[in-house]
Image: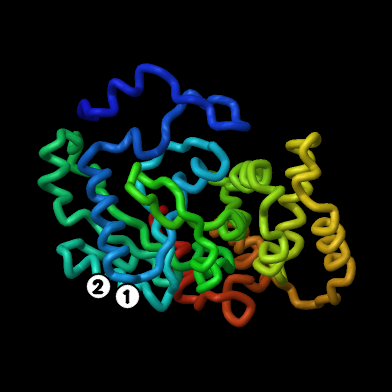
Amino acid sequence: MPQSANDDAKSSPPTARPGHASTACFPPSEVLPEATRQFYLRSLDLLDNSGIRYTVGGAYCLAGYAGIIRHTKDLDIFVRPADRDRVLQLFANHGYRTDITHPHWVAKAFDPNEHNAAAGNGRLEAPEEKPDFVDIIYGSGNGPAVVDDLWLDHAERGDVLGRPGGAPLTAPEEIIWSKAFVMERERFDGADVAHLILARGHSLDWARLLMRFRGFERVLLGHLVFFGFIYPSEQSRVPAWVTDQLIGQMRTEPPTTEKLCRGTLFSWSQYLPDIRERGLIDARAQPHGHMTQEEIDRWTNADK
């Protein structure tokens, strides 16, 4: 990585956030090459000037809400499905290369200066190095989370890349909703959920969170049970009425005889034997889920 104006700052750890132990790490933006940072800032400016509603997710939310610093080289933008093509056209009009990577949940927009910028700042160490891009997310790979007006209405302004005025961050409730379903062998977002509850449990809109998990109450209950185990002294961050309501709903679930496997909502790969060899119904597939069989096949066969 080339030298930058931030290098001197890296000689000493940052001041710990109030209520959090020092991580001896730095915000996600401080490990970015300056060319990458400027690309992200230009992208946010284009979105703001277009009037298209969006939120920023990923590492910037975890840093802002929970004090969890995770170094990342991408920028996640969340928009409504109906706005996906408008966003892609916006970026294409400004020279970005765009791609609808997986039609059911994510597209990408690549830095229009990707080749010259990479070569110019010394980052192109190998021919296969990927160019800078923005993820345009409007759903989720396996789960039922879909970006809607409510998602955008509850965004919280926060720091992104040191940008004056910040940017709209995805609210903690929606982050929990989307991350609760990520349980792959190589990636498990349960720790993110626990850290968000630890940091924001006393101020979460629990009624909205319960609404988000309607039909998936066991998923939220499972995360709350694990939270109480992980942080036994902090169980009060989850109101007792929330746990009582979830347990009550679980106990009154109507019986089902349909051979359904909901494991595919958590992992694209680990429950394939149940679908392919044991004859269970894939809960991602319509009418149980949001995905078509073509989308499921494409996602299953994708290079992840």
Which of 258/243 is in front?
243
Q: Amino acid at mark 2?
A: Gln
At label 1, counting other C-alpha atoms closer than 10 Å, the crowd grade (few under 14, some 14-19, many 20 or more) is few
- Are discs 1 and 2 less than 8 Å apart at CB? yes
Residue at x 17% of width, y 50% of height: 114
Nearest the camera: 149 or 31? Answer: 149
Q: Which residue is mark 2?
A: 89
* Residue with the mark numbered 1: 85
The quarter of the picture where residue 3 lies is: top left
Viewer-closest of 32 and 188: 32
Q: Position of residue 100 (x, y in %)?
A: 33, 68
Find residue 127 and report its horizontal and vertical position in percent.
18, 42
Within 10 Å of disc 2 (Cα), the crowding (few <14, some 14-19, many 20+) is: some
Q: Mark 1: which secondary structure?
A: helix
Q: Quadrant of the N terminus?
A: top left
Image-quadrant location for residue 135: bottom left
Report the residue at 27% width, 58% height from top.
Answer: 45
Q: Is residue 125 left or right of residue 197?
A: left
Q: Looking at the picture, does residue 110 appear above or below residue 226? A: below
